[in-house]
Amino acid sequence: MAQITMIEAITMAHAWEMEHDPSVVLLGEDIGINGGVFRATVGLQQRFGSDRVQDTPLAEGMIAGMCVGMAAQGLKPVAEIQFMGFIYPAIDQIVNHMSRMRNRTRGRMSCPVVIRTPHGGGIRSPEHHSESVEALFAHIPGIRVVCPSTPARAYGLLLAAIRDPDPVLFLEPVRIYRYAKQEVANDGKALPLDVCFLLREGTDVTIVTWGAMTVDTLKAATQLAAEGISAEVIDLATISPIDSEAILDSVARTGRLVIVHEAARNCGVGAEIAAIVAEQGLYDLQAPIQRVTGYDTVMPYFKLEHDYLPSVARIVDAVHATFVD
Amino acid sequence: MKAVAEFKIHYVQMLDPSGQPVADLPAFAHSRDELVRMYRMMVLARTFDTKAVNLQRTGKLGTYPSCLGHEATHVGAGAALRPEDSIAPVYREIGTQYWRGVRMVETLTYWGGDERGNDFSGPRHDFPWSVPIASQTLHAAGAAMAYKIRREPRCALAYVGDGGTSEGAFYEAINLAGARKLPVVFLVVNNRWAISVPIEQQTACTTLAQKAIAAGIPGVQVDGNDIIAVRDTLEQALARGRRGDGPTVVEALTYRLSDHTTADDATRYRPEAEVKAAWQIEPLIRTRAFMAATCGWTDADELALKAECAQQVEAAVQEFLAMPKQTSDSMFDYVFANQPVRLTVQKALARRYSGQGH
Ligand SMILES: Cc1ncc(C[n+]2csc(CCOP(=O)(O)OP(=O)(O)O)c2C)c(N)n1
Ligand SMILES: [Mg+2]
């Protein structure tokens, strides 16, 4: 088995599913001969033809609306939105149709669509190329929001997303597209949606995070271990709906909760997690919940992006804060 | 069956690729000063552009979108505009911006990942670049509405790429502009490519100018590598707007001689021969040839101009490299005019951790 990056795992999952399910059709800007600006679909148009891997005209509302129509008529569209900052023209179609066609038609029609888009910053991109606005989508009923944190999880979760009968927004953390290679079996095995993944077991504090922030969180956990604090790290993976049980179980064992996300703090997904634990696990907590998040600012241009992104030091300090009486 | 409406799209060219006049030339084309001014700006834009690409390669800039090949369109627009008009650019239009007083150090600041580059010199009413494709066409329509309501003889100019004309925002903007007879010009910079997608895959239209017809407004196609044609066509369109006669779509046919940006590799999707052919009709050659023929532009003039431009660019680069970085405060200070307490608290937190990330 070869060691591959997350981006290669994503390409591999696409290829597997296209090979095994003729209803899977890819569409997006520059995904054909160019293979996508991050090369997630490289080689797929050559292999599956330009009906199944379509370079669209430049219009995101069109892409999302097309997905609704194609999906309702039996295809499984997998769309790429080139960067998350360009998804906004698609939101009308996502909110008003894609996420509610099943409900509107009492199950007669549905939208098994995957919308993939790069997520987050840290790679010196221009404005609008570093957004992490998962909370906007987590707020929408009827669409799942998923974010992998390793090549293997990207492979398994993307397969699950494509096979799921409902729409999934699949967020790909750009910072770790090529961060670490991993052996990934090309066996067509999906991972489950709607569940968290335990990245590191621990007994003193639960840290919940997702996407690229898992890397910094695991570094913080290593640092904390050196000073005798045992941190349990949970990868949320499916951002919406949240796997409450896994988080509550962990907090019941550790008594402390820190949530780490790159997105802005205000009404971020961290607030929902904190609310779940406040509602159902308050008596397990030995200290107030801490959130380590991006600030309530516009994502700064890249000279300052690392001042915006939560650092290992901030995570470590937040954990320390849960030990102060 | 009788035809209820018929339409034609005209093509304007004044200099052919070798610099030969092929039409009656406007007055400014007979003025050496005007020609030198325009040519100088084209050479400056190109000199800057080459330098900026190099700065990206050495890590001093982030992703940079080259304007190579677009100089006649952008500088022609600059020359056609009045200072009180406004522009809503995309991300390549330095040829217009420098004409209007933006400084090269400001462009470098922007692509160096620093918002201060948007607080540029030149008209304070000009919009900054708008990366979300076609969104700025609506801003120009809005600006035009402001001029119309206040009865000001001004015109807004929106730039949009060939790819951008596929976005809903573009259709919404031209439609509204037509319906309300707004003083706005939509300059469609058709450089054949939207990253890797060629125009034939973008649209079934023969011209992009004809999209104007559906909006009920005039559309005209111009040789975008012919600065005389671009300037003259835009001068007329802008004057029309200022007079209250409504909007125009001007499609400038040019070619993106560079990669889409420094993050792109056009050899993956674009035939070499096409690029070679485009170099034969690029805008600087013909302007220079025309000037040599009509106003005694010499090789010595050319050398002196290039040296002067290189020197100016170098000075801008030095100024850019010496600029102190913004502090983390800057991320908080412009979110609102009246800073909420919550942000002030976060600002202090960011200061504490500044420089420690990654
Ligand atoms: C709404 C939106 N979608 C996608 C992108 C990513 N993107 C940046 S430039 C570009 C192609 C633009 O082509 P065109 O409009 O022809 O302008 P050109 O770059 O050729 O000047 C794309 C798809 C974007 N910036 N905005
Ligand atoms: Mg283009």
Image (spheres, grey):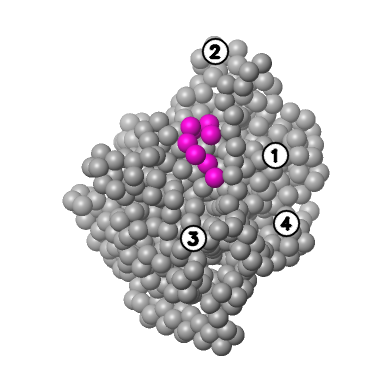
In the rendered structure, which amino acid carries the disc numbered 2?
Answer: Thr
In the rendered structure, which amino acid carries the disc numbered 3?
Answer: Pro
Would you say residue A45 is visible in this rendering? Answer: yes
Q: Distance between the Cα atoms at labels 4 and 2?
A: 45 Å
Among the two numbered marks 4 and 3 on one chain, the one whose residue lies closer to the N terminus: 3
Q: Quadrant of the N terminus of chain B?
A: top right
Q: Distance between the Cα atoms at labels 2 and 1?
A: 29 Å
Q: Are marks 3 and 2 in contact (CB under 8 Å)?
A: no
Disc 2: host chain: A
What residue does disc 2 label? A105
In the rendered view, does B252 fall on the left or right side of B82? right
What residue does disc 3 label? B26
Query: Which of the labelled discs sits on residue B136, or is there none?
Result: none
Would you say residue A116 is visible in this rendering? Answer: no
At horizontal 57% and vertical 21% (from top left) the residue drawn is B4
Region of the chain picked out in magenta, as a range: B213-220
Q: Secondary structure at mark 3?
A: loop
User: Between A133 and A225, which is closer to the camera in this rendering?
Assistant: A133
